[in-house]
Image: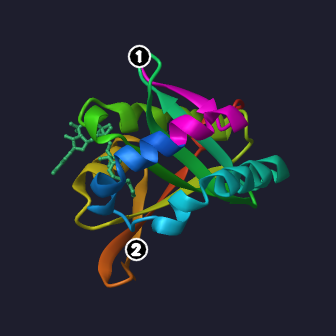
Amino acid sequence: MPTLELLRPDHAEAVLAFERANRAYFARSIPDRGDAYFAEFPARHAALLAEQAEGTCRFHVIRGADGELVGRVNLVDLADGSAELGYRVAESATGRGVARTAVAEVCRLAATAYGLTALTAVTTVDNLASRAVLAHNGFRFRYEFLFGDRPALSYRRSLADLRPSA
Ligand SMILES: CC(C)(COP(=O)(O)OP(=O)(O)OC[C@H]1O[C@@H](n2cnc3c(N)ncnc32)[C@H](O)[C@@H]1OP(=O)(O)O)[C@@H](O)C(=O)NCCC(=O)NCCS
């Protein structure tokens, strides 16, 4: 059962190793982070932690059953009760429900610990695994748009059913 940990300074080394090991895999589905991301990683990590401290983002690492870092699930642009969801899972851990479970957990945290009322997400039309993860977690399709030159889909999930008063 994967578990989430809010991003901390001491996650830096494991997150960098995760991003390096899966760079080519991720680049097949989503935009590559670019060489600068890897070259300047300590500063990038510190910047994420500063954003998180300001309350505009909530970043999490996903730990697998034996404690290894198998993914990331993030909420960015927290404003007006809403945030945008993003996630990525190590190639070696895919197809075992890690993303589905982690997204379910971050929805629960968003509604309870973070006090949010809705989440949004986007994925490209050809990212069938990501679309399945969103559908399993109650995200509803809103509209299609172009993400660069790729057809993409926008989703939204109300968190009303997960709020403490629900
Ligand atoms: C997309 C991603 C997060 C999925 O992670 P995961 O842990 O393998 O996802 P899960 O195992 O929880 O669920 C994957 C679902 O997609 C389905 N799936 C996988 N490949 C598929 C395909 N080619 N066609 C249709 N469905 C597919 C699986 O069957 C599963 O659905 P199920 O639960 O109904 O069986 C992971 O592949 C990833 O990190 N990809 C690169 C980054 C990325 O695309 N992030 C999302 C950006 S929007």
- Left or right: 21 in relation to 87: left
- Please state the horizontal and vertical placement of residue 28, each as a whole percent of the image: 26, 61
Q: Amino acid at mark 2?
A: Tyr
| Secondary structure beneath label 1 | loop
- Left or right: 153 in relation to 161: left
Closer to the eye: label 2 or 1: 1
Q: Earlier in the sequence, mark 2 or mark 1?
A: 1
Label ID, residue 21: none
Say if the magenta span includes residue 3: yes
The quarter of the image that holds ligand 1 is top left
Kindly tell me whether residue 144 is visible in this rendering.
Answer: yes
The quadrant the C terminus occupies is top right
Residue to which mark 2 is pinned: 143
Label ID, residue 65: 1
Q: Amino acid at mark 1?
A: Ala
- Please state the horizontal and vertical placement of residue 46, each as a whole percent of the image: 73, 51
Q: Quadrant of residue 61?
A: top right
